[in-house]
Amino acid sequence: MSLITHLVKLQEIDTAIMEIEELQGDLPSRVEELTSTMSRLETAITTGEARLTEIEVEIRKMQTLEQERKDKIAKLQDQLYLVKTNREYDALMAEIDHLKGQLDEEEMRELELSEEKDQVSEKLETDKTENEEMSQQLGTQKKELESRIAETEEEHTELVGKREQLAGNIDNPNLALYDRVRGAREGIAVVPVANHACGGCHSRIPSQLEAVIRGAERMTQCNTCRRILYWEEADDQS
Ligand SMILES: [Zn+2]
């Protein structure tokens, strides 16, 4: 095999390896994204549940206070029949009014708490449903990822082995050049000439240079992107 044939084969293998690694690389990040959304939801659920407990305690406290207030008011109202002077009557009435005012405030507070309780409960239910759906999704994706990795792992190992073998047939300066161009050009260092242009950057190839490439006389690079060029025999490029 000539140098250029080796390089073309090496590029094929490297492209296949890249595709496999992309496939393996995409799923973990999706799983990670789902996991972090889930942990945000779990925090929201924990916070919501704690608030709900607090609200329930506060509501019970309010109800106890209200009952005490009502009992006291009833007691004072009974005393109204027993008073003998206007002054005593006025004093009792003032106290009753004061207690009624406090009762109003407590009932208002209880109402606010009930409303908050409804809101928190509703949000909690939505979060829980979403969390459940997410954990199902995550389970499926994890399984999918594991099976895909298992499927591709073998192929990956095989390709890496082939690559090593093939790279051993290429002299170091050319291999270094190939790796350098590949690093600079998104993994593609070797491209065919297509329609008198570079298959990588589409710059026009002068006809003299094209003849050199076609004859595979020496290794040739694109003047614009520095990719290594080759002639694809199967194509009719007259
Ligand atoms: Zn080019």
Image (tube, rainbow, N blue to C red):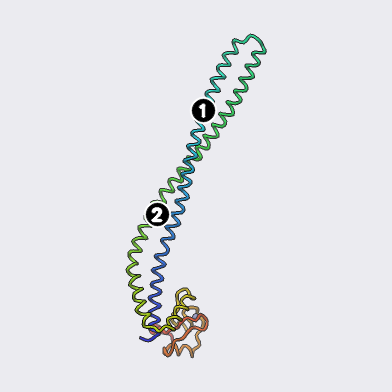
> Which comes sooner in the sequence, label 2 or label 1?
1
Q: Position of residue 12 (x, y in %)?
A: 39, 77
Describe the element under mark 1 as helix, strand or loop. helix
Q: Are marks 2 and 1 in contact (CB under 8 Å)?
A: no
Residue named by callout 1: 63
Residue 203, given in percent of the width and then of the height, sits at 51, 81
Q: Is residue 105 above or below residue 179?
A: above
Q: What residue sits 42% from the left and 63% below the top?
A: 26
Q: Residue furthest top?
A: 84
Q: Residue at x 64, y 13 (%)?
A: 89
Q: Is residue 170 above or below residue 92?
A: below
Position of 161 compared to 59: left or right?
Answer: left
Residue in the picture at 56% in, 29% down: 107
Quadrant location of the N terminus in the rendered image: bottom left
Instruction: Say which mark, if any, is on residue 154.
Output: none
Residue 178, percent across and down?
Answer: 44, 80
Query: Label 2 to label 1, Cα distance in Å?
Result: 44 Å
- Specify few, some or many for label 1: CA neighbours under 10 Å numbering under 14, 14-19, or 20 or more: some
Q: Secondary structure beneath disc 2? A: helix
Q: Amino acid at mark 2?
A: Leu
Left-right relation of 232 to 90: left
Query: What count of labels does the image hold?
Result: 2
Q: Is residue 139 left or right of residue 120?
A: left
Residue under pointer 2? 138
Q: Quadrant of the C terminus?
A: bottom left
Q: Quadrant of residue 152?
A: bottom left
**Which quarter of the figure has residue 155?**
bottom left
Sort mark 2 into few (<14), some (14-19) or many (20+) by Cα contacts within 10 Å.
some
